[in-house]
Image (cartoon, rainbow, N blue to C red):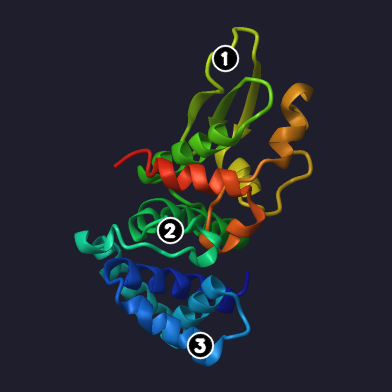
């Protein structure tokens, strides 16, 4: 990943932090979409508008914005029940609180590892990683229709989950790296050997499974899964 692409990622996150703490700022992004990126879909267009606002900053200036705004990126209470009206293919009853609590943390989680993998820089584990991983596994379980199995994830957010209630004692054991599997669930490219060691009884569905990671990607996921996730809300608060 070149320096320009890293700047785009950081500018994207800076824009996310801005409208998370001030939802009214989103109106400015919508205006930017309409003026400059009308050919893009809603969410990609507003992302591009956010990037346009911040990408001219130097690296040091942009990092300072991230340091300043990250601790303040908490939506005000009045904004949490605001409906999103189905933007970015989210269910029409999804709220701004759901976007802030569930979708955006996942998006930031994946961007951290995208940049780390592309640049070869080690990404330190963060305590919030476990929350993100657990939420994604929960959503996988909500939509799972295959045989019961035990999912054991290593790396950041390490843990073990029984997928499907009443998992039998002889259920298949699946062991994967958490970041690799979340990358796969998000639709990102992963090693073709990722599932080489998984039991055949669940391999096909594990390979085909997708979970909502970022709102702009939701159109490729099961509508039933997206609706279940929005109704369930955040796993941990």
- Compare residues 72 and 140 and report the one nearer the observer: 140
Quick one: label 1, few (<14), some, or many (20+) residues within 10 Å? Answer: some
Question: Residue 225: x, y in percent?
Answer: 56, 43
Disc ID at residue 195: none
Q: Report the front residue among 194 and 97.
A: 97
Dots 2 and 1: beta carbons under 8 Å?
Answer: no
Q: Residues within 10 Å of mark 2 (few under 14, many from 20)?
A: some
CB-based contact (under 8 Å), mark 3 and mark 1: no
Q: Earlier in the sequence, mark 3 or mark 2?
A: 3
Quadrant of the image occupied by residue 29: bottom left
The relative height of residue 135 versus residue 54 in the rendered view (above or below) is: above
Residue 45, how many percent across, how many down?
A: 54, 78
In the displayed structure, does residue 72 sit left or right of residue 213? Answer: left
Q: Which residue is mark 1?
A: 167
Q: Nearer the viewer, residue 76 or 92?
A: 92
Q: Which residue is mark 3?
A: 34
Residue extending furthest toward the bottom: 35
Q: Residue at x 27, y 67 (%)?
A: 21
Q: Is 61 on the left or on the right of 151, as rendered?
A: left
Could you tell whether 152 is left or right of 81 in the image? right
Q: Name the residue beneath numbered marker 2.
A: 104
Task: Give the x, y percent position of residue 201.
Answer: 76, 22
Q: Secondary structure at mark 3?
A: helix
Q: Measure the C-alpha gap from mark 3 to mark 2.
A: 22 Å
Residue found at x 48% / y 80%: 51
Secondary structure state at the residue bearing disc 1: loop
Q: Which numbered disc flags the more N-terminal residue, 2 or 1? A: 2
Discs 3/2, front:
3
Residue 88 visible in the current orientation: yes
Residue drawn at x 37%, y 62% is 83
**Is label 3 or label 1 in front?**
3
């Amino acid at each position: 990943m070149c320096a320009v692409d890293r700047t785009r990622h950081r500018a994207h996150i800076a824009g996310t932090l801005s409208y998370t703490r001030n939802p009214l700022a989103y109106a400015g992004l919508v205006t930017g979409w309409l003026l400059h990126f009308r050919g893009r879909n809603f969410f990609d267009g507003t992302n591009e508008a956010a990037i346009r606002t911040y990408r001219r900053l130097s690296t040091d200036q942009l990092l300072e914005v991230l340091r300043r705004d990250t601790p303040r990126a908490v939506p005000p209470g009045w904004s949490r029940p605001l409906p999103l009206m189905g933007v970015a293919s989210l269910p029409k009853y999804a709220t701004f609180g759901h976007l802030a609590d569930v979708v955006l943390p996942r998006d930031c989680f994946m961007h951290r590892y995208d940049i780390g993998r592309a640049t070869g820089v080690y990404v330190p584990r963060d305590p919030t990683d476990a929350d993100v991983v657990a939420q994604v596994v929960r959503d996988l379980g909500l939509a799972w229709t295959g045989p019961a199995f035990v999912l054991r994830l290593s790396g950041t957010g390490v843990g073990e989950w029984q997928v499907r209630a009443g998992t039998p004692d002889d259920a298949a054991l699946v062991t994967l790296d958490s970041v690799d599997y979340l990358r796969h669930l998000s639709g990102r490219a992963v090693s073709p050997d990722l599932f080489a060691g998984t039991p055949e009884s669940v391999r096909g569905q594990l390979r085909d499974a997708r979970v909502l990671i970022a709102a702009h990607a939701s159109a490729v996921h099961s509508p039933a899964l997206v609706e279940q996730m929005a109704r369930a809300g955040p796993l941990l608060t």
